[in-house]
Amino acid sequence: MTTRVNLETFINTTLTNIQQSTSQMSKLQEQISTGKKINRPSDEPAGARKILNLRSEDLRLDQFSSNIQTATQSLEFGESVLQNTSNMIQRVQELTMQGVSDTVDQNGRNIIASEINQLLESVLQSANSSRSGRYAFAGTKTTTVPFEATRNSKGEISTVTYKGNREKIEYQIGPATTVQINQPGDEVFMDNKLFDTIIKIRDNLANGTVAFARNELDNLDNAFNSILNSIAKSGGVTSTLELVDNRIADTKLSLKDVLASTESADITELVLKLKEQENIFQASLASGALIFRTSILDFL
């Protein structure tokens, strides 16, 4: 039995074919002009999901890298302050050795005590160092001045009190990796009795109690080593951050390659497909025009 196709059905079929061909050509032209084979999720849902995941991972790596840069800057600032502090402690050691020498008279010890007092003030300033309005050694209480001095009748520091806390400030540098970027001042300046030791040395030299000043040299040496350990700790974390940042940079390059292979279009292949679609389109137009020229008289 022969299936009869009326003119309306043929016209609708021809128009559908032409529209599909036109749509396909439009899609190919867009891919050629953008250089991307996936311009919207409907082009290739699986590929679009992969691209979104890759871009999301790239953004996450950017955040990790940004955190590393911020952490490195904070660590380097703290390390610089501690290095300056260690230099001042070394000077206090030198002056103390001079002051406890039998060749120095009391007038000389008074002069030495005065210089040690100035160094004590400088150490306090270092301990209260801030960066971008945030105190480096206050724990998480970064807006609070961490060290407060009590002064005697002569205006000299008699005691130093810590006003910060021992809380850690941590930055995320990986999916399950964080790094501590601060060293609480209580651990750096108070546990080693740095302030108390310098105060005792100053007062004992000024009072002429040389033996007591000499007894503080071991404490001063311990405080100096403690500061050096803090510097080394900071430097070690900075080195680790540099390695992690390098790995992130390598990973981002790999992601970029995968994204390019997933997203980028083969222009040569697309041009050939476009030419093929143009031929199909022209053939559809030609066949449609042939039928549309047919008159009803041709069927009589």
Image (tube, rainbow, N blue to C red):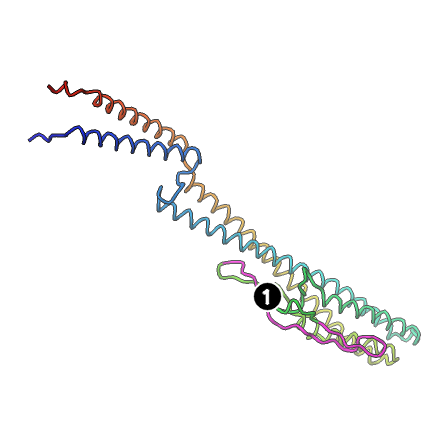
Where disc 1 sits, the SS reads: loop
Q: Nearer the viewer, residue 284 or 227?
A: 284
Amino acid at circle 1? Ile
Instruction: Name above or below for residue 63 compared with residue 94.
Output: above
The mark tally for this picture is: 1
Q: Position of residue 136 (x, y in %)?
A: 67, 65
Q: Nearer the viewer, residue 185 or 251?
A: 185
Dot 1 corresponds to which residue?
Answer: 169
Whether 170 is among the magenta residues is yes
Q: Position of residue 61 (x, y in %)?
A: 51, 53
Mark 1: give few (<14), some (14-19) or many (20+) Cα within 10 Å: some
Instruction: Name above or below for residue 38 compared with residue 57.
Output: above
Q: Quadrant of the C terminus?
A: top left
Quarter where residue 206 is shown? bottom right
Q: Position of residue 215 (x, y in %)?
A: 79, 79
Whether 146 is among the magenta residues is no
Q: Quadrant of the N terminus?
A: top left
Q: Residue at x 75, y 72 (%)?
A: 221
Q: Nearer the viewer, residue 21 or 184?
A: 21
Instruction: Name above or below for residue 114 compared with residue 267.
Output: below
The magenta segment:
147-174
